[in-house]
Image (cartoon, rainbow, N blue to C red):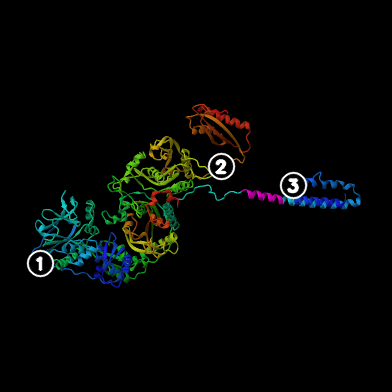
Amino acid sequence: MKITYNWLNELIKIDAFSVKEIAETLGQIGFEVSAISNLPGDTVFDIEIPANRGDCLGHLGIARELAAKLNLVLIYPETYSFPDPRSVNKVFSIDIEDTNLCKRYMGVVIEDIKVGPSPDLIAERLQKCGLRPINNVVDITNYVMLETGHPLHAFDIDKLSGERIVVRNANKGEKINALDNNNYVLSPDMLVIADNEKALALAGIVGGTESSVIESTSRIILESAVFKLENIRRTRQKLNVTTESSYRFERGSSYKNCDFASRRAISLITKYANGRFVSHNDICLPYEIKKIVLQIEKVNRILSTQYQVKDIVDALSRLEMKTEVKEDKIIVEVPPYRLDINEEIDLIEEVVRIQGYDTVPVEIKTYKTEHIIEEPLLELERKASDFLLAQGIQEVINYSFCSNKTLKDCKINREPIGLQNPLSEDWTFLRSSMLPGLLNNVMSNYNNTQARDMKFFELGKIFSTKEIGALGIICTGKESPEHWKYKSEKIDFYYISGIVHSLLKELDCNKWTADKSISEYFHPGVSAVIKDASSNTIAEYGLLQSTLHPKFLQGIYYAELFTENIQKTAGNDTPVFKEYSRLPGSKRDISIIVPEDVPYNRVADEILAGKDEFLIDISLFDVYLGDKIPKGKKSYSIRFYFTHFTRTFTDKEINEKVEQIIDRLKNLGISLRTA
Amino acid sequence: MTEQTIHKVSDEVKNKIQQANGVEEIEAIRVEYLGRKGTITNLFKTLPSLPLTKRKKTGELLNTVRDELQKLLDEKSKLLKNKSLNEKLKSEKIDITLPSRPLEYLHRHPLMQVISEIVSIFNSLGFQTVTGPEIETDYYNFETLNFPKDHPARDSQDTFYIEGSSDNLLLRTHTSPVQVRTMEKYKPPLYVVVPGKVYRRDASDASHSAVFHQVEGLAVDEKITFAELKGILTVFVHRMFGKGTKTRFRPSFFPFTEPSAEMDIGCPMCSGNGCRVCQNSGWLEMLGCGMVHPKVFDAVQYDREKWTGFAFGMGVERFAMLKFQINEMRLFYENDLRFLKQF
């Protein structure tokens, strides 16, 4: 909000302070000055007013705060004093139909008005505060709003149907032609100011063109009212309109300011528009004066300060609060315009705000929680990221949004969660997979730098009917950076499966079974899914369908892991030491011919099915498909490790063991490969 | 055999040793003179034919000469071996400046680095880490935090609502709902720190992002004071930005704290002298904080007369931008490798 130095100086004498000092003082009491503009002969402060300080949306409010902090006297501007109502014979009729939405309505009839340009002082001040001068009457209503923070409105009486103002709910579909050149269609939850026939203004938000004050106007009714702030806010949100008036009303208006602003405007209209006060009608609902009990001890207990009673009373009095000390308590009467002060703690803040936040000492203590709060997912995520970073995989963070098109392009079937009010077309959904973001990272890096070797991971939430913890990994190109000596392998399925399997092992997640993935974004023959005993998916990984990235002609491998499911399956397995043989043991290599459709895991399972306690490990060291073996077959070369605890095996014993294994493998159509 | 003969042989050998250039030559000399059929060995064999009177003296002389030659041979052999080793080492050279093998151990995303730095400072001060959901209810995100419906306080928290939830489900606009969730779950005393992702319906620009990260802190105990809030944040700032960092607290407004404050720090870039980063003010706005509002205690059924507490919350992006001198917030989410590899 814009506040001018000269105007302030009229309300409190601040000549003795520099612009910088005033700005700093405002900051110290919670009004941050975001910009200072130096104009010829004046300075304009741009001040950020907290959302709960509707009373400070005018020069008077800011002057009052400065006066309190700097201990200055506030000079109230000149106002009109209403005559004894009994001396007024003709009163304009006012009815409030919805007393819940309007608590006070003052209608003042002023006649003999001469509409014309405003005096320079008023016009200039409006312009400095960002308002456009229109004519003296309209300008005075705006001027008083900028001064008191209370919006006013003036209607041309001669444009009204009947000498009556009614504050009522809008009729369904009722229309108003507003001063902001918009036609609004209203609904019954909205409040209007009307005459006998039509809506004249959208209460507290914007006036209508028909009854507005123009050059020919000579009689007006000046409105000053108190509207329910929630309703003003709802209405202006629905109609998507914000005005100087609605901005102030939705931050609260008060009985007191309502009256003050009205009398201030009468005084100015009389002075600058030749106006003559005729009558006033004031419908005011009963209100209570807020009184709060402040326990003196509590102030210093919460702040850890050493204020005396007089310090507390002084701070509150400077803010126009009436105080009465009663033993260990202070009874505080809150000024009606302070809508933000409702309980004891609010008063404590006022005391420390005026005394200064620097009067609170700095106390350093150490703390200890008694609760054992466990966040197993955090620990799992930390382990996972450590592991992946050690594999040279870069962490990324993407926005959590995506479009329906992206999800479709990525062939993601998982039901996404939509946003009611997305920021853009590209962000209509919450991501239901890590894939769109990670794929985009590959594409944009390729487009930006022609990079072809990339490995990324992202940890975070995905959303599909609920929030799900996920880890996405994407990789393409070479496994490690190019080097003059060490040649890097191309990333393939066994790289991504290696990452997934080793990671799961690192996370103590060892009880799972692998199967073919059915996710459409994967190549059906080069992908897998891992599930736990209850068929919850732990991970999916494989080669992405090339149709997902038509402009990038290189295989991209992707893995998605579900951290909550991993965490559920993961045992907290502390390794238990197993005695091992101190003897060297024996190795034996054999090559076998295997039917092409028998997967390796069946072969390995069959080898280990013999449960030979001396066979401690096997490893596959060669896979061959080609001319040297019959069609429809493949060859595996497997190394067997045998160890005995107390002696070494003879060749004969090893041969027997291997023969037994080969015998069993015959069931799978496997035979020994002879050289 | 005369002594003269022995001396002559000795001189001959010494001369040869001196001239020898290789270990093989030395070994050849050793064989020629001291070997089984060597000249010196043969001289020993003639000893018995000498008269007894001469035999002893000549024998002693032969022994001395043999030992001396043996020693000379050993020395020269060692010398030559060292020489050839040195020559070999000298000749075996590689370019040690060629790029070494790239074993990549990467670092976390810069935002994650900053989060873990902040969190670990508070962990060390006795605050335990907790987390909460990103899809929240209006109740936890606003209502219990004293943001009434239709109140302009909600303007500062422009909210994304979940489709079909009639404004009940939303993307949390701050990590503060976790305060309430934690208080509902545990009784005081309570000291927690909450890192997490939050959402505001702000168009992205150099200093705004619709998705960003916060770290929140909450302490509830008997007799927690505003002075302690200043204390803990001062310690935090000193650890994060250095011991001499100045702090300043200004009144502010957050519905869920009262009194509320904004903490500024003396600009670490210019030591408070004024620069582009702090817009010549010497101060940087760092975080919001305050004493837990009694209404929040009411919402979680804590006795508002018994317990007091403080809370604070900070934007991670802002800290990261300051720490790494980054002037554009969107860079964190573009994930360009030229950016990410720098941290």
Q: Indicate the chain on which mark 3 is placed.
A: B
Q: Earlier in the sequence, mark 2 or mark 1?
A: 1
Q: Magenta span covers which residues?
A: B79-92
Left/right placement of residue A96 relative to residue A607 reads left
Number of numbered callouts drawn:
3
- The answer to whether marks 2 and 1 sit on the same chain is yes
Could you give the CA–CA distance between mark 1 and mark 3, rounded to whole angstroms? 142 Å
Checking the image for residue A86, the label placed there is 1
Select label 3 or label 2 by which is in front.
3
Residue position for label 3:
B25
**Badge 1 amino acid:** Arg
- The amino acid type found where label 3 is placed reads Glu
Point out the frontmost of discs 2 and 1.
1
Question: Does residue B140 appear to the left or right of A127 in the view shown?
Answer: right
Frontmost residue, A626 versus B121? A626
Q: Could you tell me the amino acid type at mark 2?
A: Lys
**How many C-alpha atoms fall within 10 Å of the one at disc 2: few (<14), some, or many (≥20)?**
few
* Residue A58 visible in this rendered orientation of the protein: yes
Q: Quadrant of residue A662?
A: top right
Q: Give SS at disc 3.
A: helix
Is disc 2 placed on a helix, strand or loop? loop
Answer above or below: position of B155 versus A13. Answer: above
